[in-house]
Image (cartoon, grey):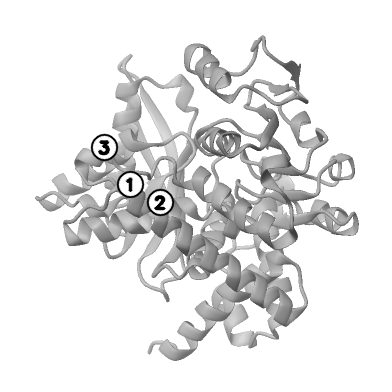
Amino acid sequence: MATQTQDDVDDAVPGREWASALYRQSTDQFDRAAELLELDPEFVTRLSEPRRSIVVNFPVRLDSGGVLGLTGYRVQHTLTMGPTKGGFRYGPDVSLGECSALAMWMTWKCALLGLPYGGAKGGVRCTPAQLSVHELERLTRRYAAELIPVIGPDRDIPAPDMATGEREMAWFMDTYSQMVGHSVFEVVTGKPVVLGGTTGRREATGLGVVYVIEAMCEKIGMDLREARVAIQGFGNVGAVAASELHAIGARVVAVSDHSAGVVDADGLDIAALARWTAQNGVLEGYPGATQVGPRDVLEVPCEIVIPAARERQITAENAPRLQCQVVVEAANGPTTPEAEAILHERGILIVPDVLANAGGVTVSYFEWVQDHQRYSWDELDVQERLRRQLRAAFGRVIDAADRLGCDWRMAALSVAIERVSQAARMRGIYP
């Protein structure tokens, strides 16, 4: 993601403090879809900016006895569709603009999948690798406590994101439960199974990427078992997608993490890569393939490129060098508008993020439903429900693309925006 610059800050007028490069990318997409739909200006006004944005500054006691001052965020894009839903992340680049863009994309993702949520996103600006487990727990619990006025199982349901996972969700859930006096498992998703989590949640986003790729290959007539795949990112999403694609028979020729990329034109041994990263923490130094830079894997010759790392990775600078037929956006906002125009001109198909990486929020919805019902589904049931949900959404995108004569991103956004604007029209404006 591009770090917010002083120009971004200077451009933000009072009342639009979230304006940033990434936020402008999300609103550029919204504006183009709204123009395509000839959307009523009323709903452009009502949906183009976040409904609620909260910034919290709080202290955390360090193991040394010192105090670290931190800034956290939570953005709720729309309250029209029901409670809001979205992850929270830890990182040095977390900002109000980043959270606002991601919250908007989460609204469209939920609407496209037919989930009863508006979009939300949050996070704390910090460097988690420099904090101990005890410090991370104190950080998470304090962040949760600061958000008590705006979160709840029927108000706003957080989930894991970058640098957060089951452990942080357990701490967050316990903090909320202590505040209200009883266990509230459904206040977050992505929890350990023993605390109301669902089987398959950890793998859901990566598995969902594969389900969407399978549907895409059927649509365009590509044999996935003969396809070469390059994946930027070997974390929870990228590693799961790589393993599943390898099991299907696709040839994964390149993967990367933040430390390095590895390339083998004959196909990588994904199990060996997983063992190496489990032992060493990073891909750097892996002896079984050619080492390249983390972003260089995007330019490896292949049929399918999967950016599964950070935002704004495919840019106007490297888009002319991509050597693929399809880009499947497993990360949020990995392609800048300028890069997207270049890829379209070159005839490279883009499967948009609001569809490709929607597996995580879909299974989070399943977890939330199970927590409310106090009844658990087995893993095969979760996977089959996920596959059906994503294929149905893919069908809606294809139908909209044919009806509107547009690319798949505009089709996906149009389906979502039509649904949210229809709900907003029927609810009206209070008072």
Q: Which residue was labeled with disc 1?
A: 379
In the rendered image, is residue 12 in sight?
A: no
Mark 3 vs mark 2: give the one in front: 2
Work out which quarter of the rendered image holds the C terminus and state it. bottom left
Q: Which residue was labeled with disc 3?
A: 171
Q: Which mark is residue 383?
A: 2
Work out which quarter of the rendered image holds the N terminus and state it. top right
Q: Is residue 186 left or right of residue 338?
A: left
Instruction: State the SS at label 3.
Output: helix
Instruction: State the SS at label 2.
Output: helix
User: How far separated are the C-alphas under marks 1 and 3?
Assistant: 24 Å
Residue 11: % across, % down: 71, 57
Label 1 with label 2: CB-CB less than 8 Å? yes
Relative to 106, does residue 310 appear above or below in the rendering? Answer: above
Q: Residues within 10 Å of mark 2 (few under 14, many from 20)?
A: many
Instruction: State the SS at label 1.
Output: helix
Relative to 18, does residue 286 appear above or below in the rendering? Answer: above
What amino acid type should be assigned to the residue bearing mark 2?
Answer: Gln
Residue 101: % across, % down: 58, 57
Q: Is residue 68 left or right of residue 250?
A: left
Q: Residues within 10 Å of mark 1 (few under 14, many from 20)?
A: few
Residue at 21% x, 48% y is 176
Q: Is residue 198 left or right of residue 285?
A: left
Relative to 110, does residue 430 appear above or below in the rendering? Answer: below
In the rendered image, is residue 346 in sight?
A: yes
The quarter of the displayed image where residue 402 is located: bottom right
Residue at 71% x, 74% y is 401
Residue at 63% x, 68% y is 412
User: How far separated are the C-alphas under marks 1 and 2?
Assistant: 6 Å
Residue at 90% x, 54% y is 346
User: How far separated are the C-alphas under marks 3 and 2?
Assistant: 27 Å
